[in-house]
Amino acid sequence: MILATHGRSIWIYDDATPLQTTTTAILNSNMHLFPVRPAIRHATRFTRYGVGDKLFTGPNPAYGALITYYLKDKPDDKTTFKIQILDQGGKLVQELTNPAKEKGMNRAAWNLRLGGAEVRRPPSEEETAFAGPPRGPHVLPGTYTVKLMLGDKSIQQTVEVRVDPTINVSPADLQAQYNLQVKLRDMQSAVNTSLRYLDSIEAQLKNTQTTVKNLNKEPDKELMKALEDYIKQVMALEDRLARRTEGLGFPGKAQVVNKIGELFFGLDGTNAAPTLYQRQYFEEIQPEYRERMAEVNRVVKDTIPQWNEKLRAWNAPTLTTRMPVEF
């Protein structure tokens, strides 16, 4: 459907099939999921640099599979509403975040990816607007299931993911890219899970410092020295896992999670097998990654319990414990 003003504007409603196929029976149903046309997996790059604060173009259709559905009424906040993507074995590939659920016709887009890595902290609105939510690896070409769930009811449609027909790439090359990106995503998740825990420990220690100072005019010097030492140890480990970016100027040296992310991003911009250099770089990252994660787990299993024993002796709040991080 194309609307033109015969002046300066043109508006294109991409894929008007749902409007053309809507019937009275569909409008009377509580929900309906329209067939999903094949989706093309292609490489994309961010190209907005250098155009000022305004764009004199309309938005392109969302990348990926366009999912169109009808809701007779808007669900209330207590009613579960989800859109999930499943592979041919019924395994969850991705669950769409906050899909539209207005009364009438709605549309969402699946970006043809697995779920992204765990994050250290939720991205800000500005970060999400600039770079989008965390991205997982592109899925391989094939047939997937779109499942729409409203309360205890669900309906589904299939969607075929195709690779860009203008490029020549073998299934083996795409599989190699996929395998390496999945490993990198999982490594990134393990490091960010560790960083989230260490951030929490750092915050708990600083909170105890503040509490002790406020409750005591002359706080126990040994306790305060221990707290300061513990904080320094935690921050040192954080800095070995990730580059600290607070403040002005150039950021510090890239650490293991930064290297993982940079390699993932380098692989993500193509539909091709990893290069020889990328495979070699992955092998170089591995020892550092294992060493750092072993450090984290020594802190989890040994250091935190030891600190808690000493904190109990001072009648100070103890620190949160957790199971070792799987990696």
Image (tube, rainbow, N blue to C red):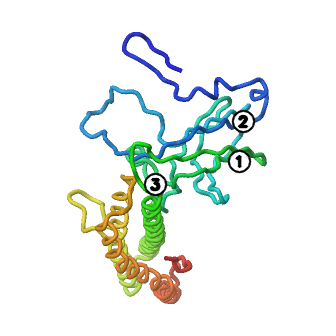
Looking at the image, tell me whether mark 3 or mark 2 is earlier in sequence order.
2
Image coordinates of residue 314 in percent, x first then y, are 49, 86
Kindly identify the amino acid type of the residue bearing the numbered disc 2.
His
Residue in the foreground of this view, choosing between 258 and 275: 275
Query: What residue is drawn where x is 79% and y is 27%?
Result: 25
Query: Quarter of the image holding residue 18?
Result: top right
Kindly identify the amino acid type of the residue bearing the numbered disc 1.
Thr
Image coordinates of residue 210 in percent, x first then y, are 42, 70
The residue at which mark 1 appears reads as 80
Q: CA distance from mark 1 to mark 2?
A: 16 Å
Say if residue 276 shows up in the picture.
Answer: yes
Say if residue 218 shows up in the picture.
Answer: no
Q: CA distance from mark 3 to mark 1?
A: 23 Å
Q: CA distance from mark 3 to mark 2?
A: 29 Å
Residue in the foreground of this view, choosing between 239 and 99: 99
Q: State yes or no: discs 3 and 2 in contact (Cβ < 8 Å).
A: no
Kindly identify the amino acid type of the residue bearing the numbered disc 3.
Pro
Q: Single out the mark in the foreground, 3 or 2.
A: 2
* SS at mark 2 in the image: strand
Q: Is residue 21 left or right of residue 124?
A: right
The residue at which mark 2 appears reads as 32
Residue 197 vertical placement versus 160 (above, below): below
Query: What residue is drawn where x is 74% and y is 24%?
Result: 23
Image coordinates of residue 98 in percent, x first then y, are 58, 45
The residue at which mark 3 appears reads as 134
